[in-house]
Image (tube, rainbow, N blue to C red):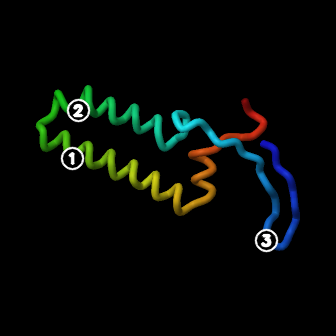
């Protein structure tokens, strides 16, 4: 990782990051896979109510990931950015 030490009073260092394409972000593609698994595995095998409960749990997890990206800069960098020196 490209890290530059600043040694200031507030900022100790700076990491250079590159924004990921929206399809490769960790708040998009894992949930696309989970929602498709829900659609093709849970819906045919469970009752309608049970399938909706599973969908609700997936939606709550997805909402929590989105909220954590708003609350934490470190989590947002982990989810939406990659190292600058990687291709």
Q: Position of residue 46 (x, y in %)?
A: 15, 34
The residue at which mark 1 appears reads as 53
Q: Position of residue 51 (x, y in %)?
A: 19, 39
Label 1 sits on a secondary structure element that is helix
Direction from residue 19 to residue 24 in the image, left or right: left
Direction from residue 67 to residue 84 in the image, left or right: right
Of the two numbered discs 3 and 2 on the same chain, state the one appearing first in sequence: 3
Of the two numbered discs 1 and 2 on the same chain, state the one appearing first in sequence: 2
- Where 42 sits versus 80, above or below? above
The residue at which mark 2 appears reads as 42
Q: CA distance from mark 3 to mark 1?
A: 45 Å
Label 3 sits on a secondary structure element that is loop
**Label 1 crowding class (10 Å Cα cut-off): few <14, some 14-19, many 20+?**
few
As drawn, which residue projects farthest toward the bottom?
A: 9
Identity of the residue drawn at 62% across and 38% down: 20
Identity of the residue drawn at 46% across and 58% down: 67
Q: Position of residue 37 (x, y in %)?
A: 32, 30
Identity of the residue drawn at 67% across and 40% down: 82
**Label 3 crowding class (10 Å Cα cut-off): few <14, some 14-19, many 20+?**
few
Q: CA distance from mark 1 to mark 2?
A: 10 Å
Front residue (pair 9, 84): 84
Identity of the residue drawn at 83% across and 73% down: 9
């Amino acid at each position: 990782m490209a890290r530059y030490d600043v040694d200031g009073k507030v900022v100790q260092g700076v990491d250079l990051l590159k924004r990921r394409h929206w399809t490769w972000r960790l708040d998009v593609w894992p949930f696309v896979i989970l929602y498709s698994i829900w659609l093709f595995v849970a819906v045919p095998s469970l009752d309608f109510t049970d399938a909706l409960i599973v969908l609700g749990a997936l939606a709550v997890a997805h909402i929590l990931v989105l909220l954590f990206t708003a609350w934490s800069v470190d989590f947002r960098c982990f989810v939406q950015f990659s190292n600058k020196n990687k291709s």
